[in-house]
């Protein structure tokens, strides 16, 4: 199933992405929310400790190291 079938207003979403790449706003900003859920194992390459979870949102040096 493609994203077109999941998102009802895919044409508007595409316009928001195109505007974002042009450093503009179509009708509202793009937004991505991530949060750990209790009882659900994290996905991805690395499992973060509780201290690292806090640091990833509050420590600029951690963000730089993680991004490089």
Image (cartoon, grey):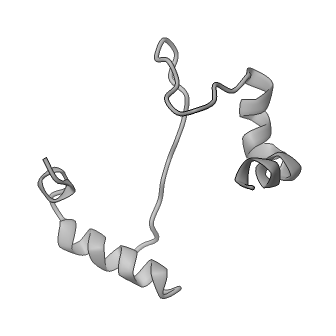
- What is the number of callouts on the image? 0
Is residue 12 visible in the rendered image? The answer is: yes
Left or right placement of residue 50 versus residue 30 in this view: right
Q: Which residue is farthest right?
A: 61
Residue at position x 52%, y 33% from top?
A: 44
Is residue 25 visible in the rendered image? The answer is: no
Left or right placement of residue 33 versus residue 2 in this view: right
62, 28: nearer the viewer: 62
Quarter of the image for the C terminus: give it.
Answer: bottom right
Residue at position x 16%, y 53% from top?
A: 2
Q: Position of residue 28 (x, y in %)?
A: 41, 73
19 relative to 60, above or below: below
Q: Position of residue 48 (x, y in %)?
A: 69, 27
The image quarter in which residue 46 lies:
top right
Q: Position of residue 19 (x, y in %)?
A: 41, 83
42 relative to 63, above or below: above
48, 37: nearer the viewer: 48
Residue at position x 20%, y 66% from top?
A: 10
39 relative to 18, above or below: above
The image quarter in which residue 8 lies:
bottom left
Left or right placement of residue 38 versus residue 51 in this view: left
Residue at position x 52%, y 41% from top?
A: 34
9 relative to 61, above or below: below
């Amino acid at each position: 199933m493609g994203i077109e079938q999941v998102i009802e207003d895919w044409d508007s979403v595409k316009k928001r992405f195109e505007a974002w790449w042009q450093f503009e706003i179509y009708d509202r900003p793009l937004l991505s929310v991530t949060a750990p859920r209790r009882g659900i194992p994290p996905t991805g390459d690395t499992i973060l400790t509780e201290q690292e979870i806090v640091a990833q949102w509050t420590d600029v040096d951690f963000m730089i190291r993680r991004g490089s």
